[in-house]
Image: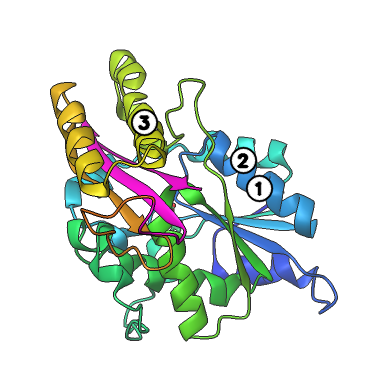
C-alpha cells in the first residue's frame, strides 16, 4: 500500500492507474478504523479491484471544538489495518493540503432541505463541512465510486444530493452498518465508552428493533417515538431524537401516521448520548 501525504504524492500514486479503462473506488474516513470501515474497503475491492482510502479528521465538520480535540487518532494502527485489508493507496493529508491558505469555499449546492433537519439542526455547519471536504477529496482522488457506511444515513443522503446537484462523476454506494455481537453499531466513538457503557449502549439497537416491530404491529409513529425516548431516558441515555422519517428526504412522518397510512421507504433514526459520547444509529422499516 502506498501512503500519500500530499496532493502531489497522491497524483503520483494514482498515475500508475492513468488509464481510463481502469476504474477505482474511494473510501473516505476520519481514521480510528474498525470493522465497519474494513467492510467498506472489502466491498470496494470486490466491486472495483483498486481502492483509495483517505484518513482526514476534517476540522470544518465539527461543530464543537472539544469534539474535534477528543476525536480518536491512531494513524499507525489504521495504516496497518488498511494494508492488511488490501487498500492500494492511503491518502493522509495535513489540513493545509486540503485547505491551502487562501482557499475559498464554493457555496453549498441545493440540498433540498436535507441539511436543515436532524443532524443538520443538531450540529450547525456539520453538513456544509462534510460536503466541502468530500467534494475536495473527490476532486483529488477522482474515483468511479465512493463507498460509505449506512450508519450515517443522513450523511449519505446529503452527499447523494450534493453529487446529483453538482454532477460529480461517480456512484455513491451505501454499505449496511456493521454491528457488534450486541447489536451496537460499530463507530470510532465507541472506544470513548467505558466497558459498562459499551455493553449498555447496545440498548440503542434494541430500541430501534422494538420500534420497527411496534410499527409493524400498527402503532403510530408518535406513540412509538415517545415511549422509545422515555425508555432510553430511564436507562440513563440522553436521547436527542428518536423519529421515523422518509428515507428519501429525512422529513418526519406525521405523529399519527401508522402502517396503514404510509407506504414509502422509512427509517427509524436515533441519536442518544451516553457517558458524554454521542451515538447515532438507524434502522429501515421494510
Ligand atoms: O463519515 C465520515 O467519517 C466523515 O464524515 C467523512 C465522510 C470521511 C468526511 O469527513
Q: State the residue position of label 3.
A: 210
Q: Work out whether residue 78 or residue 255 is closer to the camera in this orientation and state it.
A: 255
Q: Which mark is residue 38?
A: 2
Q: Residues within 10 Å of mark 2 (few under 14, many from 20)?
A: some
| Tag 2–tag 1 contact (CB < 8 Å) | yes
Kindly tell me whether residue 262 is visible in this rendering.
yes
Choose the circle earlier in sequence order: 3 or 2: 2
Q: Is ligand 1 closer than 8 angstroms to the Cβ of mark 3?
A: no
Query: In the displayed structure, does residue 68 sit left or right of residue 147?
Result: left
- What is the count of numbered marks? 3
Q: Residues within 10 Å of mark 1 (few under 14, many from 20)?
A: many
Distance from disc 2 to disc 1, alpha carbons, whole Å, reads 5 Å
Choose the circle earlier in sequence order: 1 or 3: 1
Overall secondary structure of the magenta section: strand
| Tag 3–tag 2 contact (CB < 8 Å) | no
Q: Work out whether residue 193 or residue 121 is closer to the camera in this orientation and state it.
A: 121
Q: Is ligand 1 closer than 8 angstroms to the Cβ of mark 2?
A: no
261 within the magenta span: yes
> What residue sits 77% from the left and 69% below the top?
23
- Ligand 1 quadrant assignment: bottom left
Q: Work out whether residue 125 or residue 121 is closer to the camera in this orientation and state it.
A: 121
| Tag 1–tag 3 contact (CB < 8 Å) | no
> What residue sits 14% from the left and 23% below the top?
234
Q: Which residues are magenta?
A: 260-286
Q: State the residue position of label 1.
A: 41
Q: Residues within 10 Å of mark 3 (few under 14, many from 20)?
A: some
Callout 3: helix, strand or loop?
A: helix
Residue 18 at x, y = what percent? Answer: 79, 76
> What residue sits 37% from the left and 84% below the top?
109
Amino acid at each position: 500500500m502506498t501512503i500519500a501525504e500530499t496532493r502531489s504524492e497522491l497524483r503520483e500514486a494514482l498515475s500508475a492507474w492513468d488509464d481510463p479503462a481502469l476504474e477505482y473506488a474511494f473510501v473516505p474516513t476520519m481514521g480510528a478504523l474498525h470493522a465497519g470501515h474494513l467492510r467498506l474497503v472489502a466491498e470496494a475491492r470486490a466491486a472495483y479491484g483498486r481502492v483509495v482510502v483517505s484518513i482526514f479528521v476534517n476540522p470544518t465538520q465539527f461543530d464543537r471544538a472539544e469534539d474535534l480535540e477528543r476525536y480518536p487518532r491512531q494513524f499507525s494502527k489504521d495504516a496497518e489495518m488498511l494494508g492488511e485489508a488490501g487498500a492500494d493507496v492511503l491518502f493522509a493529508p495535513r489540513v493545509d493540503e486540503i485547505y491551502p491558505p487562501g482557499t475559498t469555499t464554493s457555496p453549498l449546492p441545493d440540498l433540498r432541505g436535507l441539511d436543515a433537519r436532524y443532524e443538520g439542526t443538531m450540529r450547525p455547519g456539520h453538513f456544509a463541512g462534510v460536503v466541502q471536504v468530500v467534494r475536495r477529496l473527490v476532486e483529488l482522488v477522482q474515483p468511479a465510486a465512493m463507498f460509505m457506511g449506512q450508519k450515517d444515513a443522513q450523511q449519505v443522503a446529503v452527499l447523494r444530493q450534493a453529487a446529483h446537484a453538482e454532477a460529480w462523476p461517480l456512484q455513491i454506494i451505501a454499505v449496511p452498518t456493521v454491528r457488534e455481537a450486541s447489536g451496537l453499531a460499530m463507530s470510532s466513538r465507541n472506544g470513548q465508552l467505558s466497558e459498562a457503557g459499551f455493553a449498555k449502549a447496545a440498548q440503542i439497537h434494541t430500541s430501534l428493533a422494538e420500534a420497527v416491530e411496534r410499527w409493524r404491529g400498527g402503532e403510530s409513529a408518535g406513540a412509538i417515538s415517545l415511549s422509545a425516548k422515555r425508555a432510553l431516558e430511564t436507562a440513563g441515555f440522553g436521547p436527542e431524537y428518536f423519529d421515523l422519517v422518509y428515507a428519501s428526504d429525512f422529513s418526519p412522518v406525521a405523529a399519527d401516521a401508522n402502517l396503514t397510512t404510509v407506504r414509502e421507504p422509512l427509517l427509524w433514526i436515533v441519536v442518544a448520548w451516553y457517558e458524554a459520547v454521542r451515538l447515532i444509529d438507524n434502522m429501515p422499516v421494510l
